[in-house]
Image: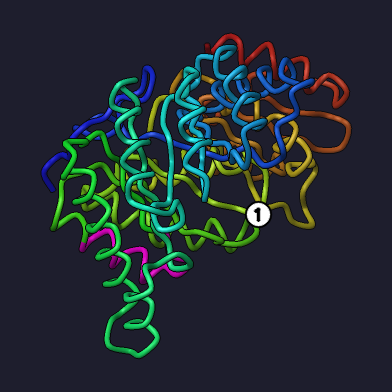
Amino acid sequence: MASTLSVKAKGLIIGGGFPVSIQTMWKEPLASQALEAAAARIRGLAGLGCDVLRFAVPDLDAAETLGRLAAMVELPLVADIHFDWRIALRCLDFPIAKIRINPGNIGARWKVEEVARKAADKGVPIRIGVNGGSLPQDLREHVDSGSLLRAEALVEAALREVEAFEAIGFRAIVVSMKASSVEETLEVNRRFARERDYPLHLGVTEAGPLVPGVVRNTAALVPLLKEGIGDTIRVSLSDSMESEIVAGREILAAAGLGRTGVTLVSCPRCARAGFDTHAFTARWAPRLYALATRVTIAVMGCVVNGPGEARHADLGITGAGDKVVIFRKGKIARTIRREDADIVFEEELRALE
């Protein structure tokens, strides 16, 4: 696929052959009295690999709060607006990196155009978000009657909105067409990519809890990314923002688009395990995924197979009884007490950075 047009969202470039960016979405109401804590968590998300963070903005008070937060952090923040175009206009008075609107529920065309004109003045791109729940009435009727596939209707709805923006000369657009099925996600994005060269935001909407959500997103996003379709992704999960970011990183890696950073391998644990791989991995995953160095880390369950099975790892840890073994490239480097495992592992990890 040829590269898409590019848009700039604060310091991030989306499309144009630039690296595929990873997004997540803030999952609680944003409290104005807790902005310092929110800013700290946002910095943690950025360290984990988040490139863009989206916020639902249901009213003007939320717009004010998000505007204050946007001035406190470097990470590009996106305002997600439904129904009231005035909220989008207010957000554009702040250093918001991108506006996401669903033109299907914003209302009259002049309202969308007013948002687009102010966004153009501010140099802020707009993401056109289309989904099956807000299709134009005529397209919905065609889908219900069986005369039009839902994927065809989603693409047609997106093209209508794109053409409306083009009519007023606005082209700083990112497009998303969200479906909850893998097949429709593949179909709509392939169809749109043949029609237009705007950057595409990929994701399976309402994908479910952690395991089914990751499976569905992987099944849809990896083929598209390998075909050169997709400029930014969100792995939508009924789980934490951190899980969405890690899942996004792993999906990019599976598509051959991995970044510098950790490859974390860990054994599933069995009856011969002498080391609690589950607890250790959960405890260390945030620290490991924040590494900028390209390394492979192994957390293995027993000394019988651990160093051998993970001989490719730059650093590994396993244990038996009251002892813990640190190994590098399959060779045992240190044998230590179980209670010293975290301290020594940190020492070894710093030596790799």
**Main secondary structure found in the magenta portion:** helix
Q: Nearer the viewer, residue 232 or 136?
A: 136
Work out whether 113 lies above or below 77.
below
Question: Where is residue 127 drawn, in percent x and y?
Answer: 36, 42
Q: Which residue is mark 1?
A: 238
Point out the stretch of residues depicted in magenta: 178-191
Left or right position of 268 against 328: right
Question: Where is residue 143 drawn, in percent x and y?
Answer: 35, 82
Residue 296 among those drawn in magenta: no
Q: Amino acid at mark 1?
A: Ser
Which residue is at a point 26% across and 29% down the rendered structure image? 7
At mark 1, the secondary structure is loop
Left or right position of 158 against 100: left
Colour scheme employed for the rendering of this structure = rainbow
Question: Where is residue 25 drawn, in percent x and y?
Answer: 57, 40
Q: Nearer the viewer, residue 215 or 57?
A: 57
